[in-house]
Amino acid sequence: MTSTLLTGIGELVTNDPTLGDGSALGLLPDAAVVVEAGVVQWVGAAGTAPDADEQVDVGGRAVIPGFVDSHAHLVFAGDRAAEFAARMAGQAYAAGGIRSTVSATRAATDDELAANARRLVDEMATQGITTVEIKGGYGLTVTDERRALALAQELTTETTYLGAHVVPEGWAADDYVALVVGEMLTACAPYARWVDVFCERGAFDADQSRAVLTAGTAAGLGARVHANQLGPGPGVQLAVEMGAASADHCTHLTDRDVSALAGSATVATLLPVVEFSTRSPYPDARRLLDAGATVALATDCNPGSCYSTSMPLAIALAVREMRMTPAEAVWAGTAGGARALRRTDVGHLGVGAAADLAVLDAPSYVHLSYRPGVPLVRQVWRGGAAWPRSAVAA
């Protein structure tokens, strides 16, 4: 196998506290990395780097682990620009808007859905996202949910069964839940790693959500929960009760919710671009971090409440609006996302990790929040290879 030495790294974020400055980011100045067979083989000071078959000099730029986006809805058709415009004119966001995307998605061909999802995954990669979770949830029939997950599985191993997104038109809630935990789950489980439920007013209550998660975990899927987005509710408590990997949104939390997250392995995944796109209150990340909870950041790319693939934007908003430090936000978008997916091979650049990284056109990771809106991701490496394959100019 060919080995590659990435050298000339002005600042390397490893997310390995045993390296570099000993912080959570494991910062190394004047660093180098050797990758081979798709993984990191060596990390250290550039002056002590071993020989490799090939060498790439990144010209003093900062390098960070590839972003890990643990919450995205990418298999859909159409858009909801008119709904966005209405929100900006004062209309409140509600879960029911999902049904308009369901109609468009059901009408789309497999090729159309696959092409749109691939376009979004590629768009994410240009912004440094090297691992992405993709949910279903815009079909709401056995056939459409199964095909959504089959298409998602072509793009990522992190696929999530979200038949319990909303109750489709013409169904009683309990009858639809019976379908979700029965025939639909049987059809979808072979294509999914996770099960998720929108535990929210206008979607599914605590008992219905518990039934969905119980059935999903019995089928061998890990649990995730859309929790406490639109108001206080049972979602976070249910996520902790069920041992879910992640409770996502966490916008409206009680002290009991914060304590539950801090005392559990359930990650609080925050999605600040949603709040930006819906003019809603931001989650209080500082409160969660100070309590000892693990926090991740994700895009929640979807056509309704957040049509953005930008993790750098999520990081900048987390720093500006949610009182995270630049270091905490970058960790949350990389190692935090990996925790939310219960992955140990991504989100860091220690020896043995996947060689997934982003080269920034900046001297430090701090510029991701210091220079919001500027396209700083110069190049992305996935599995030890440049994506797209092109040389890094000095």
Image (spheres, rainbow, N blue to C red):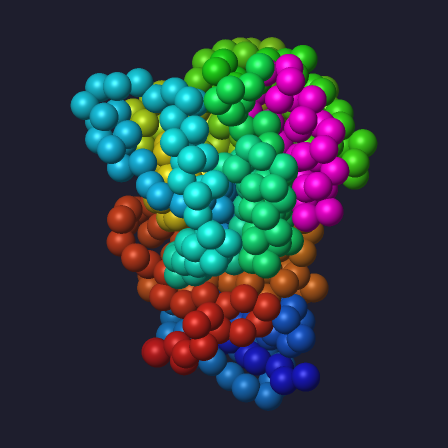
Identify the residue at horizontal 59%, vertical 88% (top origin): 53
Residue with the most extreme left position: 89
User: Is 153 on the left-hand or right-hand side of 30?
Assistant: right
Q: Nearer the viewer, residue 273 or 372?
A: 273
Vertical side of 216 occupied by 3: above or below: below
User: Is 84 on the left-hand or right-hand side of 60?
Assistant: left
Q: Quadrant of residue 99?
A: top left
- Residue 79 appears in the picture as rendered: yes
Task: Give the image location of residue 288, x and y in percent.
Answer: 53, 24
Vertical side of 275 occupied by 252: above or below: above
Report the magenta residues as a range. 173-199
Q: How many marks?
A: 0
Task: Give the image location of residue 87, x and y in percent.
Answer: 26, 25
Q: Main secondary structure of the magenta part?
A: helix
- Residue 274 appears in the picture as rendered: no
Identify the residue at horizontal 45%, vertical 35% (top origin): 102
Q: Quadrant of residue 319?
A: top left
Is 186 included in the stretch rendered in magenta?
Answer: yes
Vertical side of 270 occupied by 384: above or below: below
Q: Nearer the viewer, residue 232 or 120?
A: 120
Q: Nearer the viewer, residue 198 or 319?
A: 198
Is 387 included in the stretch rendered in magenta?
Answer: no
